Every structure is written in structure tokens, then in C-alpha cells.
Image (tube, rainbow, N blue to C red):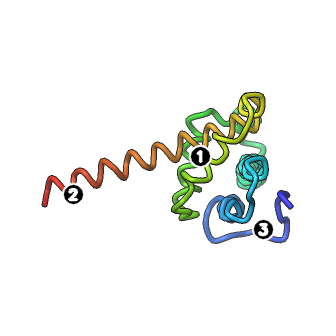
Amino acid sequence: EFIRTKNIEYLSYPYETAIQLLKQIKKYKTPFEKMMIIASISNEITECINDFWRNLSEYITNDLLNLEIDQLMAIFIYIIIKAQIFDISVHCKIIKSFTTCLTQASMIGYYYSTVEASVLYIQSIKNINDLFKNKVN
């Protein structure tokens, strides 16, 4: 269920399959299922990057394909914005409130933390924009 669909090969915009996965988070009720969606998105990001560079393998080494946290967070920000899930912070609160410390300390927890930080970043930018709009008016 949380596996990449291979029948979607060439899509209209980057990370579209990851965006579609994130949209599925609403369908799942348990925090663990929601975390599994996030882990699947992380795997999908890697697949999308690998697919993009596959034909250029003679120019790119595997070292260049490793994602750093800042890069991963930027991609998650893009995916969250494109998915337009307006209650994403609610899903994050459910995960944070009802998962164990052990789960949060795992690799899945790492991906969740990246999503949570991305959501907080998006919210802070929105708050700053709202503040500027109010000051101008």
C-alpha cells in the first residue's frame, strides 16, 4: 500500500508521486500509518532523484546523490506546498502526541521530524507574510 507505483513514469512536475503519497495521509487514522506514509515519501524522493540522474550516471557519482538534511527539508517543503493539505499540522500533532519516544528516535521518526520542521517553516513564512499585509494596510 505504501509502495511506489511504477506505472507513473513521467509526470508533469517534480516529485509528483511523492506529492500524491502525501495526499493519502488523510486516509489513515493511526499515527504509525501516517509515519509510514512519510517514510514512503522519503523513499520516493530518493527514487525521483535517482530516476532523474539515471541517464547521466557517467557524470554523477553516488556521493553527489546523497541528500543532506537541508536539501531533504527543502524538498519536503516543496512537496507539502504542492500537496495543499491545509490540515497537515493536525496530522503532525497526531503523530507527535501518539507515538513513542522509541519510534520518534528511529529513522521513521527522523523523517517525521523533517516534515514537522518543514510545516513549521511554512507556517512561519505565512505568518510573516500576513504580518506584512497587515502593516501595509
Q: CA distance from mark 2 to mark 3?
A: 41 Å
Dot 2 surroundings within 10 Å: few (below 14), some, or many (20 or more)? few
101 or 36: which is nearer to us? 101
Disc number placed over residue 9 in the picture, else none: 3
Q: Which residue is mark 2?
A: 133
Please determine whether, in this image, residue 114 is positioned above or below residue 80: above
Q: Amino acid at mark 3?
A: Glu
| Circle 2 or circle 1, nearest the eye | 1
Tell me the amino acid under the disc marked 1.
Lys
Discs 3/1, front: 1
The residue shown at (83%, 57%) is: 2
Q: Are marks 2 and 1 in contact (CB under 8 Å)?
A: no
Looking at the image, which is closer to me, 27 or 67? Answer: 27
Position of residue 127 relative to residue 101, above or below, is below
User: Rounded to the nearest whole Å, what is the CA distance between mark 2 and mark 1?
Assistant: 28 Å
Q: Height in image: 66 above or below 44?
A: above
Helix, strand or loop at label 3? It is loop
- Looking at the image, can residue 44 be seen? no
Q: Nearer the viewer, residue 102 or 58?
A: 102
Secondary structure under badge 1? helix
Q: Is residue 63 visible?
A: yes
In the image, residue 97 lies at what x, y percent?
64, 40
Q: Residues within 10 Å of mark 3 (few under 14, many from 20)?
A: few
On screen, residue 73 above or below 82? above
